[in-house]
Image (cartoon, rainbow, N blue to C red):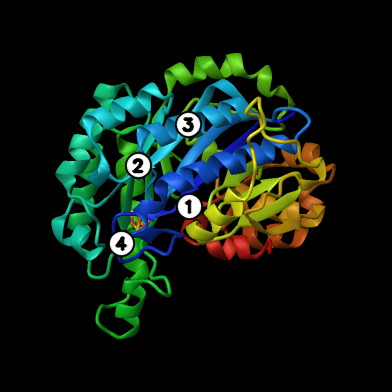
């Protein structure tokens, strides 16, 4: 069976950033303990609907702010995952952390739990920008977090940065990037600021209190960043993601090839790519646990209830107290639904093919290969999507290279227009 991924959503933050529209809540930290218990219940529920343990090669604690969970809560969740699934010994286990919530002791505990990848939300090195975004940390907190993480033994760190703020000067963006590069992370995620409806930034812009971000300036900043990162050895592998070479990973990868041979796409870990996110972009299966968690497994897309309180209530009704401590057996027909599921939509083949194109084309290096598409669907990608492909190649937004379809540099800037053609 092909390896699966697991996403766990932690919907708690100390403060809501001005641009954030994620499913996360400030001031509900008193729920964290019960929430961690509910997560364990949901994991056990899914395991009880399966005849055999699912192979799992990546686990991702995302949020929200997963670093608000105590090491004890994370340990118990990880223990439940290891008991419930066949987690590969070299699984990538990532955790998103807010640099304002960390300590050296906590990071050492995380590393000792087997968490081996840390994603830090740096966003900017400039106090004014961090204030505007309402982040709870400053650049020195990021420096400290990286230092502590290295001391704890993390050798796979990612930094997130945001560009294209209203009236942001190119120089402050370059400066933030340089300060981030000075910390030598293995991975970068760079996102253009978007004004989302319902966020403070969105309403300030709607009321004319701040200017809208300038998309042309943001495009210039993106191109500048791509150039700067390439110059110092980072490879872009996705529209918003860059990674350094991983010599150790290449060796590990060869050993892993046998295990993953059944997967249509063997994972080539020659870069410090985020293996978990690659699973999404390759449209491969993953389970989504937690409030607002999304999953794609068993030919179905699932969505969980958004509210952490409702999530806890739905899972607290379950009784897992058999004498052996094992979850009770549920019907295999339930899989992948759980009491927290509010939507479970079957994905037909046609939709899966479209989604495979839309997500796969985000991968700027890998693209979508004709041969892999043929193996997966038994159909020709060229014939199935003849019209949009021809059109996008004519517009110079896509190009063919060795039977692989990829975004052109221009296509990377206009990704949404490309993906729309496959809806
Ligand atoms: S820390 Fe992240 S998830 Fe939390 S409010 Fe800020 S941007 Fe959103």
The residue furthest right is: 378
Say few, some or many: other residues with alpha carbon within 10 Å of mark 3 (under 14 / 14 to 19 / 20 or more): some
List x then y, in percent, for residue 72. Answer: 39, 32
Say few, some or many: other residues with alpha carbon within 10 Å of mark 4 (under 14 / 14 to 19 / 20 or more): some
- Mark 3 / mark 2, whichever is N-terminal: 2
400, 163: nearer the viewer: 163
Is disc 4 in contact with disc 2, using a CB cutoff of under 8 Å?
no
- Quarter of the picture holding the C terminus: bottom right
Q: Measure how far apart labels 1 and 4 are at the Cα level.
A: 31 Å
Relative placement, left or right, of 342 versus 9 is right
**Disc number placed over residue 17 in the picture, else none:** 4
Q: Which residue is mark 3?
A: 76
List x then y, in percent, for residue 393. Answer: 63, 57
* Callout 4: CB less than 8 Å from ligand 1: yes
Residue at the (22%, 54%) spot, across then down:
136
List x then y, in percent, for residue 237. Answer: 48, 40
* Callout 3: CB less than 8 Å from ligand 1: no
Q: Which residue is mark 1?
A: 409
Question: Where 229 sits versus 324, above or below?
Answer: below
**Res 197 quadrant in image:** bottom left
Is disc 1 in contact with disc 2, using a CB cutoff of under 8 Å?
no
């Amino acid at each position: 069976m092909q390896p699966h991924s697991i996403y766990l959503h932690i919907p708690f933050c100390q403060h809501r950033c001005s641009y954030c529209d994620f499913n996360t809540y400030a001031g509900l930290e008193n729920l964290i303990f019960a929430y961690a218990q509910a997560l364990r219940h949901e994991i056990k529920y899914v395991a009880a609907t399966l005849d055999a343990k699912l192979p799992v090669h990546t686990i991702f604690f995302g949020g929200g702010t997963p670093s608000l969970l105590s090491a004890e809560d994370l340990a118990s969740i990880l223990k439940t995952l290891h008991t419930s699934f066949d987690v590969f010994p070299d699984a990538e286990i990532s955790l998103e952390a807010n640099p304002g919530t960390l300590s050296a002791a906590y990071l050492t505990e995380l590393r000792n739990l087997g968490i081996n990848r840390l994603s830090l939300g740096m966003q900017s090195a400039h106090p004014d920008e961090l204030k505007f975004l309402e982040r709870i940390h400053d650049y020195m907190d990021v420096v400290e977090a990286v230092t502590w993480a290295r001391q704890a033994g993390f050798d796979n760190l990612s930094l997130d940065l945001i560009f294209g703020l209203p009236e942001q000067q190119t120089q402050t963006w370059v400066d933030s990037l340089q300060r981030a590069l000075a910390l030598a992370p293995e991975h970068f995620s760079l996102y253009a600021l978007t004004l989302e409806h319902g966020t403070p930034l969105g309403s300030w812009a709607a009321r004319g209190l701040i200017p809208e971000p300038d998309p042309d300036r943001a495009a210039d900043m993106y191109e500048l960043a791509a150039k700067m990162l390439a110059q110092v050895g980072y490879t872009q592998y996705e529209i918003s993601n860059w990674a350094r070479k991983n010599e150790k990973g290449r060796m590990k990868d060869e050993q892993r090839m046998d295990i993953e041979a059944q997967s249509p796409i063997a994972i080539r870990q020659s870069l410090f790519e985020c293996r978990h996110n690659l699973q999404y972009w390759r449209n491969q299966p993953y389970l989504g646990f937690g409030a607002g968690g999304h999953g794609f497994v068993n030919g179905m897309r699932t969505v969980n209830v958004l509210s952490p309180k409702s999530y806890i209530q739905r899972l607290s009704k379950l009784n897992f107290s058999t004498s052996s401590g094992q979850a009770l057996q549920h019907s295999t027909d339930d899989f992948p639904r759980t009491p927290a599921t509010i939507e479970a939509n079957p994905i037909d083949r046609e939709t899966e093919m479209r989604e495979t194109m839309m997500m796969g084309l985000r991968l700027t290096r890998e693209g979508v290969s004709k041969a892999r598409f043929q193996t997966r669907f038994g159909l020709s990608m060229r014939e199935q999507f003849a019209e949009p492909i021809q059109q996008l190649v004519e517009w110079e937004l896509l190009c063919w290279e060795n039977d692989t379809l990829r975004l052109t540099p221009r296509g990377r800037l206009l990704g949404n227009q490309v993906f729309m053609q496959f809806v």
